Amino acid sequence: MSAIASPAGGQGVGRPRLVGRVRGLIGVYVQEARNAVAEQFQYRAANYFYMIGMIAEPVIYLVVWSTIAEQQGGSVGGFTPGQFAAYYIVWTLVRSMNIVFTPYGWEWRIREGQLSAQLLRPLFPIVEDLGFFIGWKVVVIILWLPLAALLALVFRPELAPTLLEICVFAVAIWGAYLIRSLNQSTIGMVTFWTTRVGPIFELYMTAELLLSGRLVPMTLMPEWVQILAGLLPFYWTFGFPIEALVADLPVERLLGGLAMQLFWIVVGAVALRFIWRFAVRRYSAVGG
Amino acid sequence: MLAGAVSRELESVVHVADLRKTFRVPVREGGLLASIRSLVRREHRLVHAVHGISFDIAPGEVVGFLGPNGAGKTTTLKMLAGLLYPTSGEVRVLGHVPSRRDSAYLRRMTMVMGNRNQLQWDLPALDSFELLRAIYRLHPDDFRRARDDFIELMELGDLVRKPVRNLSLGERMKVEICAALLHLPDVLFLDEPTLGLDVTMQKRIRAFVADYNKRRGATVLLTSHYMADVEALCRRVIVIHHGRLLYDGALSGLAARFNATKTIAVALHEGTPDLARYGEVVSSDDGVVTLRVSRSDAPRVTAELLRDLPVADLTIEDPPIEDVIESVFAVPKPVE
């Protein structure tokens, strides 16, 4: 029987230095993402059907708007069928990147006591969620590529982004992912008080559907809706990343959009930490 | 006396003083009418899961935490682990207040729950181990050494390379315990770690915990419904019932405190006469008669047996620990 290893002098325990903490955190994200990739590759078929199901929604929007555009002489609100195609094909990628741990997941964790295992670890639970879904996105992007190629072949998108637009899009889709993760986790916290969070989440999703650019490009909405959308986080998680790539936004709007995303990330992070402090005290660890 | 209490607290790894946890639970009668009524007027009941318990545990001690279902054991453990906020009272573990969930505290403790899966279901345990290495920021060499030692001690072999979902309950529990100890914690809260396992697996886990305690000097607080676990690992037990502390002391002292009987097993050279006049006959097999007598009568009955009968062998024992525990659990709930 060999001796149990001893982390002499606490070597095995990380030091609370900022650089060490950041490196440690990156290590957690990387390992969690690796595990997610390994896990999701086991379920290739399930993931593919999931992707196909997700693509059905924008294809319906695309067909409807393209038909209307053709009937109205080739465009609706300045959008040609080719621009609609570009919008909704990019939509599919943004939507895939936007998948996050939902309030339903929090509800399950809290009601069933599944949160206990995570609370025992020296890590804020959302870090594990973020890492896991980053890994899942790697799988999703790989599976998305052939589907996007097929959609492009069928619907012929008009897409000619500049290098700056591509760069802003690449950053914006991760910004959108963070905003949605933080918002939905914050809503999930409500479970600590209400045990069920479904109706509140449905309300959130309805608002998102109307005010994000998910249902229809925001430029087709009345002006007051556009103003309202700009003041809320939803547009910055859907419409903005898509428009960054497909619309010819001026540089100031591109950078302003990233700044708005940063603002909502900070708001989301502060709100989540604040609510968490009170919420976790209500955890009853039932079943766990 | 106060100085003694202060010094005990300072020396303690676990310090609990007048700890209480009360849950507010919604209640209603069954049926549709009661359901509709609860829409307007919801009723609640206060459940005092833990009702003012106090104890200290010294470094390196292995303590059995006993009580029937619903006694408040797991609630207490969860408060010690920082999962639950106490309603009132004081808790300190390794000098930390657990409910604050300081990172420095969580890195030095672990809690194993018999029904909880910390491992990623679809992946081999080795992948979960790697994630734990990252979370606890373990030095790669320390991590590898601990992991390999645990795999050897628990005889895990290739089990760590199979997806967790393909492991049996016992196999999963062994892997789970390894995962929980990879960061080499100083304090272990074990809640039914051998629940549902076969005897061999129970023994393996017991030996592992004993070995870990011996080598690391770790403090262990263990709950188990299997008295074999407690007898093998704990010299001291804390018994709670209805959320109150009933006993805190040596395991051997439990019988004296709660069970007023002794068991006398007597083997005779010839015949198996009726020994009912000496005490309650519990069994009579292969020439060995087992009697249950009151603790105070044991010396007198022993002397009479030796005087009256051709005794070949005679042993006096405390009753089995299961019987003692049964007596303890028979204590009625105090009126509040």
Image (cartoon, coloured by chain):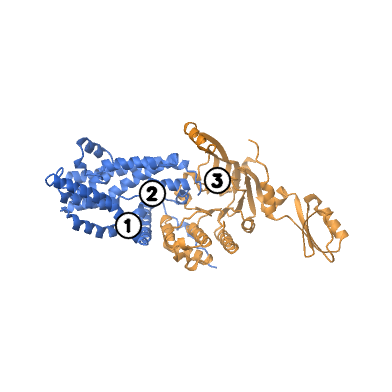
Tell me the residue that label 1 is attached to. Answer: A49
Amino acid type assigned to the residue bearing label 3 in the image: Thr
Location of residue B61 in the rendering, given as x and y in whole percent from the top left corner: 60, 54
Of mark 2 and mark 1, the one earlier in the sequence is 1
Give the farthest residue toward the right.
Answer: B308
Crowd tier of the residue under label 3, counting other residues whose Cα lies within 10 Å: few below 14, some 14–19, many 20 or above? many
Amino acid type assigned to the residue bearing label 1 in the image: Phe
Amino acid type assigned to the residue bearing label 2 in the image: Ile
Tell me the residue that label 2 is attached to. Answer: A126
Image quadrant holding the C terminus of chain B, namely top right
Q: Tag 1, which secondary structure? A: helix
Tell me the residue that label 3 is attached to. Answer: B75
Q: Colour of chain B?
A: orange
Closer to the camera in the image, A273 or A246: A246
Chain under numbered label 1: A
Q: Colour of chain A?
A: blue
- Residue B286 placement, left or right of B11: right
Chain under numbered label 2: A
**Cβ atoms under marks 2 and 1 closer than 8 Å:** no
Q: Residue at x 19, y 58 (%)?
A: A153
